[in-house]
Image (cartoon, rainbow, N blue to C red):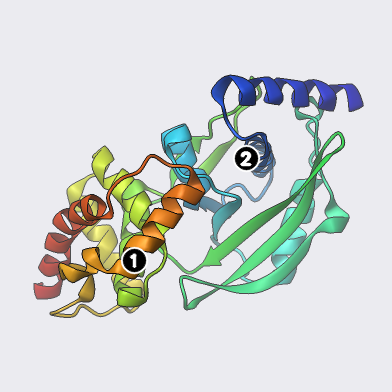
């Protein structure tokens, strides 16, 4: 196992050099991938659905923003800390020697969190180890959301030539709908620049069905009890020119090491694509 871990580390370091990827980020992605692999081999594979930054990485690769956490939706499983700790304790005991990774069952800790400002969730932390490399892996698990039309079975991309995880994942339409709902809910108080970036990328990709997207927005707003308003600040031009928001955007781009995109361009795409859906549902 020790020699395997050293070999894996060397291969990851080589990839980091060749692709000019931060080695720490690559290690985190590797640990996330191998946790998802264990999920795919467990009896819980249909109880968790991938969402968030790790899913965007699966779709877009290095064009996506860096993410340090795994985000999952719990389905058909008790939404409490004890159940999550038990489930992931079982995942962490699954051995797959060829990836060199060990997840420490004894290190697992849980806490309650609130996802998207109002929905209860569980934050789980576990120490992942590859030889002498140790990394805290954080997994945020939400509950109660609805995926439109349904979860998608996907093969998660692997960094090395190892067996790929086959897991349940969000549909593109539901990812867009949930991020849009969060923008409407937070209004002018929204400082989540990552959501603006993600929405811009997803809407530009065109990899969604417009009718399904409208249904996903409708379902998400109804499920989260989010009202429609006639004059929402997101749809006012001054939203895109607010000086504090522009500073936040520039800081986000710089910290995430992304190519600069003007916030005004991002805003225009989001508004042009999503305001018509919002107004249709508001008047429907």
Within the image, what quadrant is residue 225 found in?
Answer: bottom left
N-terminal-most mark, 1 or 2? 2
In the rendered image, which residue does mark 1 sit on?
245
x and y, in percent, of residue 53 in the image = 49, 49
The answer to whether residue 77 is left or right of residue 202 is right
x and y, in percent, of residue 5 in the image = 83, 27
Could you tell me which residue is drawn at 69 percent across and 25 percent down?
12
In the rendered image, which residue does mark 2 sit on?
25
Can residue 19 be seen?
yes
- In this rendering, is residue 209 above or below 131? below
Could you tell me which residue is drawn at 71 percent across and 66 percent down?
83
Can residue 220 be seen?
no
Q: Is mark 1 on a helix, strand or loop?
A: helix
Q: Tell me how far mark 1 sits from mark 2, CA to CA.
A: 27 Å
Instruction: Name the image quarter holding the N terminus.
Output: top right
x and y, in percent, of residue 137 in the image = 70, 51
Question: Marks 1 and 2: which is nearer the front?
Answer: 1
- In this rendering, is residue 106 above or below 92? below
Could you tell me which residue is drawn at 15 percent across and 61 percent down?
277
- In this rendering, is residue 245 above or below 20? below
Instruction: Name the image quarter holding the C terminus.
Output: bottom left
Q: Nearer the viewer, residue 25 or 36?
A: 25
Q: Nearer the viewer, residue 263 or 127?
A: 263
């Amino acid at each position: 196992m020790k020699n395997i871990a050293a070999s894996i580390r060397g291969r990851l370091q080589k990839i980091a050099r060749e692709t000019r990827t931060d080695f720490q980020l690559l290690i985190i992605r590797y640990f996330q991938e191998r946790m998802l692999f264990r999920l795919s081999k467990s009896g819980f594979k249909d109880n968790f659905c991938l969402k968030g930054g790790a899913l965007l990485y699966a779709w877009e690769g290095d064009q996506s923003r860096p993410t340090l956490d795994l985000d999952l939706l719990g389905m058909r499983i008790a939404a409490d800390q004890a159940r999550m700790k038990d489930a992931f304790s079982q995942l962490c005991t699954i051995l797959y020697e060829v990836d060199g990774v060990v997840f420490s069952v004894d290190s697992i800790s849980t806490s309650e969190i609130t996802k998207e400002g109002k929905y209860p969730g569980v934050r789980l932390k576990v120490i992942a180890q590859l030889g002498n490399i140790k990394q805290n892996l954080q997994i945020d698990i939400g509950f109660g959301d609805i995926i439109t039309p349904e979860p998608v079975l996907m093969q998660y991309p692997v960094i090395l030539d190892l067996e790929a995880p086959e897991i349940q994942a969000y549909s593109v339409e539901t990812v867009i709908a949930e991020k849009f709902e969060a923008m409407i809910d937070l209004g002018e108080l929204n400082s989540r620049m990552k959501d603006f970036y993600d929405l811009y990328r997803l809407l530009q990709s065109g990899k969604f069905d417009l009718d399904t997207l409208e249904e996903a927005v409708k379902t998400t707003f109804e499920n989260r009890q989010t009202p429609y308003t006639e004059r929402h600040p997101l749809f006012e031009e001054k939203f895109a020119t607010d000086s504090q928001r522009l500073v936040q955007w520039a800081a986000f781009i710089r910290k995430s090491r992304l190519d600069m995109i003007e916030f005004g361009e991002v805003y225009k795409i989001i508004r042009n694509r999503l305001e018509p859906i919002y107004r249709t549902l508001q008047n429907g």
